[in-house]
Image: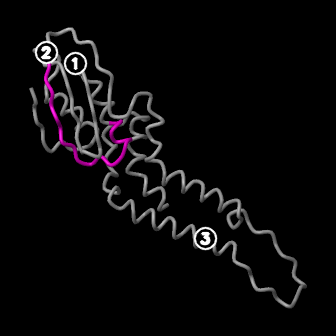
Amino acid sequence: MAALAASMCCITPFLALVAGTSGMASSLAWLGPLRPGLIGLTIAVLVYAWYQRLKRQPKDDCTCEIEEKPRFMQSKTFLTLVTAFALLMLTFPNYANVFRNEPVGQNSPAKVQGKPKNRAVAEFTITGMTCAACEGHVASEVNKVPGIIGLTVSYANSNAVVEFDRSKTTVEQVQKAIKATGYKVTETKIKK
């Protein structure tokens, strides 16, 4: 459970993209700061479980009892499966972008029909992004806005830099697309 909770802040945006429910993407972003503690808890629980499973039991002098086969949930096989699942969950933020078709956080520049004077660049400061899956979710929503020419989303910088055609879209429409993902836009800077 701790391993799942440790990566839930990154799994939720991925599931939101798959399910098409943008608003739920950042609902578990509050778990992001707790991630190191949850990872530690997961490792401690797994180490303890393996220790308990592998430690030698003292032998009784009486050999009259036949040793029973452990139930599946008490077996090494089950513990191995739980360990593998925990490792997959703990490392999910590192490979989440594999499930995306386009480079995370960016799109390829579109051919714009308008004149160069219609181009504008805006930088949006975004709170709540914690991993590459968050970047991908924001990029996916912003790319749906007509007139987007270029886009770079960075969870490390907590921002999105968007180049767009002012004759086809506005800063407010781009901001609305970002907010639709569930993340908050705290500042917008318009560059010329």
CA separation in Å, label 2 and label 3: 61 Å
Q: Is residue 69 above or below residue 188?
A: below
Badge 1 amino acid: Gly
CA separation in Å, label 1 and label 3: 55 Å
Q: Quadrant of residue 85?
A: bottom right
Badge 2 amino acid: Ser
Q: Position of residue 92 (x, y in %)?
A: 47, 48
In magenta, the rendered stretch is 118-137
Q: Position of residue 101 (x, y in %)?
A: 44, 28
Q: Report if the CB atoms under discs 2 and 1 are less than 8 Å apart.
A: yes
Sequence-first tag of 2 and 1: 1
Q: Position of residue 186 (x, y in %)?
A: 15, 45
Task: Identify which residue is drawn at 24% across, 20% down.
Answer: 149
Task: Identify which residue is drawn at 70% across, 64% down.
Answer: 76
Q: Is residue 179 above or below residue 147?
A: below
Q: Which residue is mark 3?
A: 49
Q: Which mark is residue 167?
A: 2
Count of number-bearing discs: 3
Q: Which residue is mark 1?
A: 147
Task: Identify which residue is drawn at 50% across, 52% down.
Answer: 89
Q: Report if the CB atoms under discs 2 and 3 are less than 8 Å apart.
A: no
Crowding around mark 3 (Cα neighbors within 10 Å: few <14, some 14 to 19, many 20+) is few
Sequence-first tag of 1 and 3: 3
Q: Quadrant of residue 84?
A: bottom right
Sequence-first tag of 2 and 3: 3
